[in-house]
Image (spheres, rainbow, N blue to C red):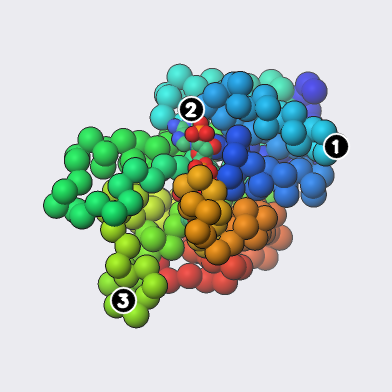
């Protein structure tokens, strides 16, 4: 396909498996052209081919979200190939420190978690924002986590109160803050910026013990990615409802 795509175009990061793969599928099922960002071209091609066999309009872009060269080339690639970008789902994420107490956390793990879960989202939003500003319905969805909720972290009645994983949790709290900051800056534009927690989902990161399927977990992110114009911006959502920060 060459510029210009007549359908909406979405970029989903970390799309080769788990929630990113399912979000890509559900967006493409709505007739949206989906660019699946994957750090491994081999895994990306396998994922794209799986969805194409379902008749879906999906493409692969090599995108390691911690690689500034990959991010720098994104806007030109999207402009030249599709001529637009309407939806960005910052989904790629890592969880390295499940079960680790803050006092035992290696600072290098903290730094690398922030690179993957926080700085990446900032860098990608900044890179693609000029292209998204040309859309009449730009939507940015940051895949955060209920584990980044400070309310839950401090509430001894919350099921997540006892979770240990400060690097992951702090990176998602920071991602929530980033969501609010960009939403405020873009308030007068047609771009909405929201954060979603998918719930606890059966993926490699969530483990098989989780209670939701990827199909269920993808619902709120896809809903936020396709919100109509008279919808909220700068919110944090789980199961399509506001979730405490
Ligand atoms: N599962 C849950 O219960 C749950 C709950 C709340 C929030 N979340 C969030 O949901 C998002 C997706 O997680 P998931 O559960 O689907 O986990 P997953 O199955 O482990 O998938 C994570 C995805 O992120 C990709 N990724 C990691 N680092 C990357 C990088 N530097 N560049 C590009 N891609 C990278 C992975 O690619 P590779 O295959 O190459 O590693 C993979 O595609 C994450 O942000 C996670 O924090 C998940």
Residue 99 is situated, as x and y percent measured from the top left of the image, at: 29, 54
Task: Point out the residue furthest to the bottom here.
Answer: 157
Question: Regarding mark 3 in the picture, which secondary structure is present there?
Answer: loop
> Ligand 1 within 8 A of label 3's CB?
no
Residue 75 visible in the displayed image:
no
Q: Residue visible at 32% across and 62% down?
A: 163
> Ligand 1 within 8 A of label 2's CB?
yes
- Residue 149's label in the rendered image is none
Q: Residue visible at 80% across and 23% down?
A: 1
Disc 2 to disc 3, how far (Cα)? 35 Å
Q: Residue visible at 63% across and 27% down?
A: 44
Question: Regarding mark 1 in the picture, which secondary structure is present there?
Answer: loop
Residue 177 is situated, as x and y percent measured from the top left of the image, at: 38, 55
Question: Crowding near pointer 2: few (<14 within 10 Å), some, many (20+)?
Answer: many
Closer to the N terminus: mark 3 or mark 1? Answer: 1
Q: How many marks?
A: 3
Q: Quadrant of the C terminus?
A: bottom left
Closer to the N terminus: mark 1 or mark 2? Answer: 1
- Which of 114/50 is in front? 50
The reply to whether discs 1 and 2 touch (Cβ–Cβ < 8 Å) is: no
> In the displayed structure, does residue 234 sit left or right of residue 98?
right
Residue position for label 1: 55
Task: Point out the residue furthest to the front here.
Answer: 209
> In the displayed structure, does residue 22 sit left or right of residue 112?
right
Disc 3 to disc 1, how far (Cα)? 46 Å
Task: Point out the residue furthest to the left here.
Answer: 103
Residue position for label 2: 64
- Residue 155's label in the rendered image is 3
């Amino acid at each position: 396909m060459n510029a210009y795509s007549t359908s909406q175009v979405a970029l989903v990061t970390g799309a080769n498996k788990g929630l990113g793969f399912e979000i890509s599928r559900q967006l493409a099922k709505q007739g949206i052209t989906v660019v699946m960002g994957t750090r491994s071209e081999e895994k990306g091609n396998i994922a794209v081919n799986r969805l194409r066999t379902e008749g879906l309009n999906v493409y692969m872009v090599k995108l390691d979200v911690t690689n500034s060269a990959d991010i720098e080339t994104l806007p030109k690639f999207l402009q030249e190939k599709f001529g637009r970008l309407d939806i960005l789902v910052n989904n790629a994420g890592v969880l390295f420190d499940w079960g680790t107490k803050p006092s035992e956390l290696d600072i290098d793990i903290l730094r690398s978690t922030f690179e993957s879960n926080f700085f990446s989202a900032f860098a990608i939003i900044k890179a693609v924002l000029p292209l998204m500003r040309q859309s009449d319905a730009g939507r940015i969805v940051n895949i955060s986590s209920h584990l980044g909720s400070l309310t839950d972290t401090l509430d001894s009645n919350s099921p997540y109160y006892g979770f240990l994983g400060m690097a992951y949790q702090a990176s998602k709290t920071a991602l929530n803050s980033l969501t609010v900051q960009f939403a405020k800056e873009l308030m007068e534009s047609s771009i909405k910026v929201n954060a979603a927690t998918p719930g606890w989902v059966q993926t490699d990161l969530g483990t098989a013990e989780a209670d939701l399927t990827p199909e269920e977990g993808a619902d709120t992110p896809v809903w936020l990615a396709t919100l109509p114009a008279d919808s909220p911006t700068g919110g944090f959502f789980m199961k399509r409802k506001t979730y405490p920060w």
